[in-house]
Amino acid sequence: MRIIEHTEGKVSGPGFYRMPAALYHADPCPEPSLSSSIARTIVEQTERHAHAAHPRLGAEAEDPKKRKLDTGSVAHELLTGQGRGIHVITATDKGGEPVTTYQSKAAQAERDDAIARGETPVLPCDLERAEKIVAAVQQRLQTTRGAERAFVHGEGELALIWRDRTGIWGRALLDWFDLDTATIDDLKTTSAGLSDRTLATRIAEGLDIQEAWYRRGLAHLMPELSGRIRFRFVFVEADAPHEVRVVPLTGSQQYLGERRMIAAAVAFRECLKSGVWPGYPEEVSPVEPASWAEARWEAREISDPLFRRYGAQISLALSPYSPTEDAA
């Protein structure tokens, strides 16, 4: 595997690249390319939304000062050893203590200067939190059978650029890739907890598309790995106790992710060809209820004390033959 160092402009062709994060997110492919985030936008919203979000198509120029700053980004950079570069804010309050917010003009100016240089500014208190997150991840991975090599052996922040079988250009930015085991590890911080239901929801909301697109790109560049590529999400809580779960997708999740990913790729290709990026249908149409909503309510009707207390009256009220208040 040859990694090409690339610092500016468009890439010359497919391959594995190391490049600044800003350059990758600006889309350095020879033609506008599909990323997993744009694919998710197509599937979860519309092609028009994808066009508006794409850096080479309809997206407005990003104001660096409005760039989202979060502890997860800092933790990601600490764990992978790759990224924009971290600048720890040195401004102090009136008492000489490190600032804990960006309320002071000195802290704001230092933050803005770091962003202008392409770095990630972080308050000392947020850096400490990020370090705790990273320590929790490293400790858990070392005690998780089969995950000991994650974020230790391999390459971090590896950009994949390829010409997909569908005819479009694709790109993906791997958090971590271990060539020896053909394993991709992707770090996700969350404030929503790590329950099965929460993680299943996040996967269904588009992480399955990311998994499929990343595996597809890697298999294209290294066909000898086809059928052997593993992908795992490493979820970690942003808040104490910073619990960690290592989660591969199930076969059914992978199957669904691949179908959704292919649908997005075909839609992207056809929109590029035609120059037409449809939005929502111009028609009056109902929204079907979520499949779980009815099942949840039926289960509640069986178990909830409310229905045990008023069950007979509720059944009577639902009946077309129930007497009215006036008749009573």
Image: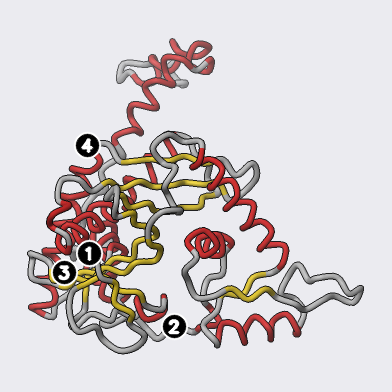
Mark 3 crowd level (few <14, some 14–19, many ≥20, 10 Å Cα): many
Residue 29 coordinates in the image, percent (x, y): 23, 80
| Label 4 with label 1: CB-CB less than 8 Å | no
Q: Residue at x 50, y 75 (%)?
A: 84
**Which comes sooner in the sequence, label 2 or label 1?**
2
Q: Residue at x 37, y 81 (%)?
A: 23
Q: Which residue is mark 3?
A: 268
Q: Quadrant of residue 249?
A: top left
Residue 261 visible in the shown view = yes
Residue 127 coordinates in the image, percent (x, y): 66, 63
Disc 4 residue type (three-letter):
Gly
Q: Which residue is mark 1?
A: 280
| Label 2 with label 3: CB-CB less than 8 Å | no
Mark 1 crowd level (few <14, some 14–19, many ≥20, 10 Å Cα): few
Closer to us: 9 or 141: 141
| Label 2 with label 4: CB-CB less than 8 Å | no
Disc 1 residue type (three-letter):
Tyr
Q: Residue at x 39, y 14 (%)?
A: 316
Q: Circle 2 — which element?
A: loop
**Which comes sooner in the sequence, label 4 or label 1?**
4
Residue at mark 3 to residue at mark 4: CA–CA distance: 26 Å
Circle nearer the viewer, 4 or 1: 4
**Which comes sooner in the sequence, label 2 or label 3?**
2
Residue 328 visible in the shown view = no
